[in-house]
Image (cartoon, rainbow, N blue to C red):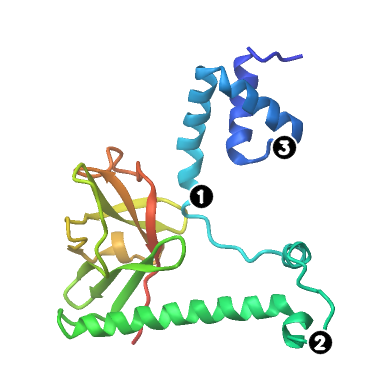
Amino acid sequence: MMRRTDPQLRDQLAAAYVLGTLHGHARRRFEGWLHGDAALRACVSQWRARLLPLAEFAPARMPRERVWRGIESRLRLQAPGRRWQFWRRDPLQWWKMLAVTAAGAAAVLALVLALALQARTPPADTFAALADERGRPALLVTADRGNHQATVRSLHQIPVPDELTLQLWAITQQGTPRSLALLDERGTATFALNERAFGSDVALLAVSLEPKGGSPNPAAPAGPVLYRGGWVRPF
């Protein structure tokens, strides 16, 4: 039987803890170990550094119906009464409709912003609206495929500490990051539009927060990914 001091056990438990597969009493016991074990905390940190960046590029998934029903039950949205009958009859459908509407509005907003910017910049036939985790657009990437050039512009001021910088990446369908450009203090950049940025295997663009000069690992972001979005061809 493996003991708490067993290196293999410690490493396996740290990985399961970060993945979220350690449940119940085992998770609570492991968290108790963490309080008095600096080496174990370091092991958890190492697993976070390995695993959490992978989640940044995982595609979004629609929750199952039973998840919606569980939310409905906990919020007691099925209370009796004739008032707000439409809501009571299918409140989950209402929330889904709002979510779809919001997503559509965001896409239209991004398109309008792209077309508006074209009046002040070289012709662009492709764009990408990069949004934060709440879906709020923060950066707009416009591409002129004829001249093989792309430009990044911020839609509002993005506060970045002096010792840090924003870095733009292309993420392939296999999850491999490709560095494209460093953004200046105004959140702008210009870079070459080639297969590295616009190849058929590019799934999305992402912007991470990195040390000054860019990620120390040229093959992957070292800091958190703040914004992401995919290329769109409006024409």
Residue for badge 3: 23
Task: Name the residue beneath numbered marker 2.
Answer: 82
Secondary structure beneath label 2: loop
In the rendered image, residue 100, in percent from the top left (x then y), is placed at 56, 79
Looking at the image, residue 214 sits to the left or right of residue 227; the answer is left
Residue 168 lies left or right of residue 74; in this view the side is left
The residue mark sitting in front, 1 or 2, is 2
Q: Nearer the viewer, mark 2 or mark 3?
A: 2
Q: Nearer the viewer, residue 145 or 118?
A: 118
Question: Looking at the picture, does residue 38 appear above or below residue 166?
Answer: above
Are circles 3 and 1 on residues that touch, CB within 8 Å?
A: no
Residue linked to disc 1: 55
Q: Tag 2: Cα neighbours inside 10 Å, few (<14), some, or many (≥20)?
A: few
Q: Position of residue 138 (x, y in %)?
A: 33, 66
Decide if residue 110 is on the left or right side of residue 89. left
Distance from disc 2 to disc 3, alpha carbons, whole Å, reads 42 Å
Of labels 3 and 1, the one closer to you: 3
Can you tell which mark lies on residue 232?
A: none
Mark 2 is on which residue type?
Arg
Instruction: Give yes or no for contact between labels 1 and 2 (Cβ–Cβ under 8 Å).
Output: no
**Quarter placement of the C terminus:** bottom left
Q: Amino acid at mark 3?
A: His
* Amino acid type shown at disc 1: Ala
Could you say where residue 212 lies in the image, as x and y percent from the top left? Answer: 20, 43
In depth, the one of 55 and 209 nearer the eye is 209
Q: Nearer the viewer, residue 49 or 125?
A: 49
* Badge 3 or badge 1: first in the primary sequence: 3
Looking at the picture, how far across and down is residue 130, in whole percent?
36, 66
Label 3, secondary structure: give it. loop
